[in-house]
Amino acid sequence: MKLYTQLMMNQSQAPGAPSGAGKAIIHARMNIGDTVLIANDVPPSVFQKIRSVYIYLSVDSPEQAERVHNLLADGGEVYMPMKETFYATRFSQLRDRFGVSWSIIHELPRP
């Protein structure tokens, strides 16, 4: 979660945090336009990497698509390199270093 939210409180800072919580995130909230994305870490005993769900992130510019792609690709696995397609000025698919799969797009302007 540090990759996504570098300013959030972690469990070791939270009042009443269980021992051994380390730097796990108990509640992360990100506003993306009018959408709110809320996430948290889970205990190692229940953690499983996500394999079949992609977070689809539409950005405002080709430059932003490149920036987000490069950030998430660092230490991850790129399935489709960032490129222009018939439906987007930039599009890529990857799995980040934490096992989360992403589709990143800057859509072509609509006619």
Image: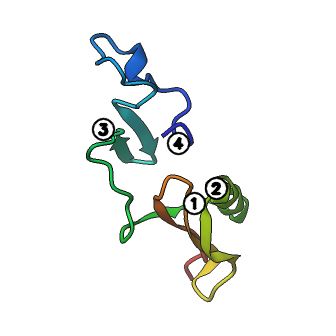
As rendered, which of 88 and 24 lies closer to the eye?
Answer: 24
- Give yes or no for contact between labels 3 and 2 (Cβ–Cβ under 8 Å): no
Q: Which mark is residue 4?
A: 4
Q: Which mark is residue 43?
A: 3
- Pinpoint residue 81: horizontal percent, then vertical percent: 67, 75
> What residue would you read off at disc 1?
59
- Pinpoint residue 22: horizontal percent, then vertical percent: 43, 24
- Pinpoint residue 54: horizontal percent, then vertical percent: 42, 67
Q: CA distance from mark 3 to mark 4?
A: 18 Å
On-image quarter of the C terminus: bottom right
Disc 1 is placed on an element classified as loop
Q: Which mark is residue 68?
A: 2
Residue at 36%, 44% (x, y): give it: 36
Q: Quadrant of residue 76?
A: bottom right
- Give yes or no for contact between labels 1 and 2 (Cβ–Cβ under 8 Å): yes
Q: Nearer the N terminus, badge 4 or badge 2?
A: 4
Q: Nearer the N terminus, badge 1 or badge 2?
A: 1
